[in-house]
Amino acid sequence: MIFKHLFTPKWKHPKTEVRLQALNKLEQDKDADVLKTMALEDNSTEIRQKALNKLNSLSLWWQAYKQDQALKDLAEQHISSAVLNGKSELDSNIRQEYVDRFASKRVLEKLAFSESSLEVRVKLLKRLAQPKLIEQSFKQDDEQLQLLLLPLVEQYGLQKQLLKSAKGQAKSALEQALEQQKLAKEKPAEVLAQVKMILAKLNALRDKHDYKEVNNQFKILTEQWQGLELSWLDEEAVKENEQKYSAIEARISSHLAALKAEFEALEKAEQAKREKQAFLTEVESQLNLAEQALVNALEQLDVSKQAELDIQLSQLRSKITSSAYSDVLVKHLDTLVDLESQLKQLPELVVANQAAQTALEALANITATTELSELDDTLNAQKSAYNNAKGIIEQLPNTLKKPAKAKLSALSKQFKAAMAEQLDAQQNELKQARRKAKDVQRLVEQGRSKVAFGVFKGFTEHFERLTAANQAQLEPLREQISAQLDDIRDWQKYASAPKRVELLTALDSHIENCDLAPKQRAELVKKLRAQWHELGRVDTDEEKLQAKQFDEKLELLFAPCRAFFAEQEQQREKAKQARETLINQISELAVTDTSLEGFNWREYESQFNKLNKQWRAAGSVDSDVYKSLNNAFKAQAKLIGDAIRSQHEHNAHLKQGLVDTAAEQIAAEDLAQACDVLKSLQKQWQTIGFAGNKKENQLWQAFREHNDAVFAKRSAEFESQKAEKDALSSEQQQQFDEIKAELPENGSEAEIKKLISQLSEIDFLPMVKKQVQKFITELQQKLVELEQLANTARFDALKVALENGGSVPAEFISKIGVNLSSEQLILRLEILSDKMNDESSSPERMAEQVAMLDDKLQGQNVDFDHYLSAYLSNTPTAELQSERLLKLL
C-alpha cells in the first residue's frame, strides 16, 4: 500500500486533502487533461467544482450540467450566463440544445429580449406563449421585429393594444387585420341581407308579366348574385342559399320562356298594326296632297290642272280599292268622291272663289282709326264688309270654305286687335260712367247731396269721352240725374243760410271761452272748418262776407296752437339731428374693416345693438323725414347685420365641425385619447365667437351631449379597469402569500435566493409591490446574517485546524499568485486586523502599509480574506505561524 501511494499521482490520491493540494498545484495549460479528468470523474464535489472553475471551460460545464447532479445548478448558472451574455466561447450546438431543451422559463424570457437574432426571439416568444411578453417586445419600436411578431399578435388578439405602437408596414398590416376583423363581424350579416334581397327580388319577378322588364331585371339580379362575396358566409349557408338560387332561377327561366312566346306573338300583331297604320297614313297624305292641289288650282284660278288632278285621283281610288284595308277606308273613299265632284265643278268653283277673294280684299282694306270722331263710322263699315264676305264664303265647297273662313277670321282678329285699345277705352269709359251714375243716385237717396255733386262731375267727364253712339245709350240717365241735382241745389240754398249764422255765433263763443289744450283746440278748428264746408258753395255777396268773417275768427281760435306746434317743430328738429348723428355713427361702423386678424366681433356687435337701441329711443320727426332717415339708417344697418350674420354663419360652421368631431369620438376605441381630443375641442369652442340666437344653443346642446356620452363611457371603462386591477391585485396578493409561505422557517441560502429570484420575476402592482420589496429586503438581510454565520463557521474550522495542527480547510486554499513572502502576508493581515506583533519591527510594518496603499490605488485586492487565502495557500503547513495567526482570527 505504501508503494502504491508512493507511485500514484497526488491528484489520484484517495485523500481529498491531498487531491486538493495537488489540484492547487496543477496548471491550466500544462495539466489540462488531468484537470478535465478531475472535473468530470473525481468523486469529490468540491474538487470537481474547483477543477471546473480552474479550467473555466463552458463545454465542460455543459457536460457537468448533464451528468453531475451535485453541480447541475452551478453549471446551469455558467451556461445560462453565457447564453444570456452571448459569449462566443459557448458552442452554438450546446447553446441551441440548452435553449431548446433545458433553459428555464426565466432564462427564456430574458433571452427573448436580449437575443440578437430576431427570428430566435420570435421563436422564443412563441414557445413562451405569454401575450404580455409579446406585447412588450412589439413595443420596442423595431419594425422588422414587429413584422415577424405579427402572427403571434394575431394569434393572441393583440391588434388593438399594439396598433398605436406599430410602425410602417407592421402598422399597415395591423390596420388591415383590424379592418378584416371588423368586416368578419359585419360582412356576414351584410352579405346575408344582400342574398335575401336578391332572392326576394328574383322571386318577385314571377308575378310580373312584362317580358322586357322581367328579362332585364333577371340579368341585373344575376350579375348582382355573381358579384356577391359569399366567402364571408359559412359553408352551410352558402350551400343553402345557392340551392335556393338554383330553384328560383329554374322557375324564372320557365316563366321567361312563356313570357317570351307571348311577347313575340304581340310583336307580330303590333307589326301588322304598324303596317296597316302606315298604309292609312300614306293614303291620308295623298288625299291631303290632292285636296291641297285642288285648293291651289282654285286660288290660282288655274283650270289647266284639272286633267292632271283627275289622273291623280283615279290612281288613288285604284290603290284604295285594291288594298287589303278597303273595309276601313270607307271614309277616305267618301272624301275622294267629294274631291272628284269638286274637280268636275272646277270652272264654276274658280268663279265663286274669285268672288270670295274680292270680298276678303274689301274687308282687308278697312283700316283701324285712332280718332274718336271716326270710330263709329269705321266700326259700321267693317261690320258691313265682314257680313258680305261671310255670306259669299258660305256658298263655297268645303275645300274652299275652310281656308276662306280662316282668312276671314284672321282679318277680323287683326282688325279687333288694332281697335282693341280704342274699344277697351270706350267700354271702360261707358262702364265708369254707368257706375258713377248709380253712385249719384245712391248718394241722393241717402241725402248726401254734397258728395253726389262731386260724383256727378266725374260722371260728366266720362260721358264727354264717349262716342256719339255710346253717349246716346246714357243720355236718358244723364238728364234724369241732372234734374234731381238741380232740385237739391235749390233746396240747399234755402237751408244753409241760418246754419252759417249759427256756426259764426258758435265760433265767437269758442273764442271767448275755449280752454282746450293745443292739440284738442286744433282738432276743434278742423271740425269747425269741415262743418262750414258742408254748408255748400258760396255764391252771393252776403255768403262771401260770412265766409271771410269765418276765416278771420277761425284764425283767432287757432292762434294759441301756433306756439305749441312751433315748439313741437323744434323738438322734431332736435330729434332729426340726433337721428342724423346716429346715421353718421352707424355709417362709420359699417365701413369698419372686419377682415383684420383678431377682429373683436363681440365689441362690434355690441356697438351695433347699442346704436339700434338709441335709434328706437330717438324722438319723433315728420313722417316724410322719418322715412328718408330710416331708409338711410336701415341701409347701413343692413350692411352691418349682413356682416354679423355672415360671421355667425361662419362661427356656426366652425362649431358644427367641432360637434361632428365630438360625435366621432363616441365610436373611438381609445377613450383616453378621445377625452384628450374633446378637451382640445372645448378650448377651441371658447375661442369661436357667437353663432346666432337660433343655432348657438342647438350646437352647444349637441356638443355637450357628445362630450357627456364620451366621458360617461370613459368613466365606465375606468370603473371596469379598476375592478380588473383590484381583482389582479387580490390575485397577486394571494400569489405573494403562497410564495412567502413556501419558505421554511430556517431556510437555506439557496432557498432564500431562489425565493428572491422568483419574486423579482413577477411584475407586481404597486399595492402589492411595497409588501414584496419589504419582504425581499428582509430576505436580503437574512442572507447577510447567514453569510456572517457561514464566515464564522469557516473561521472556527480554521481555528480548530490551526490549534490541532490539522489540515487547513480546502475552502481557504486557492491558487493565488502573489510575489509576497509568508512574513509579508501575515504582517499585512496584522495591519488589516490592527493588531501588533512584538516580533515585527516598525519599519517593516510601515513599508507594508505603504505597499498596501499603493496596491489599493492600482486597483488590486487588499482585503483580509485575500491575504489570508494567499498566506494559507502559499505557506507550507509546517511553516504556518499558528499562534500568531490565531490572534488575528
Image (cartoon, rainbow, N blue to C red):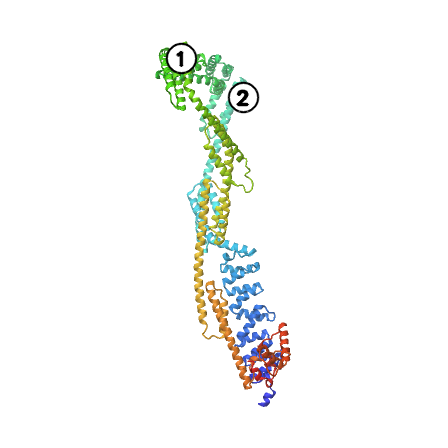
Which residue is nearer to you in this view: 411 or 42? Answer: 42
Quadrant of the snapshot with the N terminus: bottom right
Tell me where residue 70 appears, x and y as whole percent. Answer: 52, 77
Which residue is nearer to you in this view: 390 or 25? Answer: 25
Name the residue at the top extreme.
541
- State the residue position of label 2: 308
Which residue is nearer to you in this view: 785 or 218? Answer: 785
Decide if residue 675 is in sight here: yes
Q: Give the CA distance from mark 1 to mark 2.
A: 100 Å
- State the residue position of label 1: 546
Are the residues flagged by discs 1 and 2 in contact, CB closer than 8 Å? no
Query: Toward which corner of the image does residue 455 lie, by quadrant?
Result: top left
Which residue type carries mark 2? Glu
Classify 90 as above or below 479: below
Q: Residues within 10 Å of mark 1 (few under 14, many from 20)?
A: some
Q: Residues within 10 Å of mark 2 (few under 14, many from 20)?
A: few
Which residue is nearer to you in this view: 869 or 485? Answer: 869
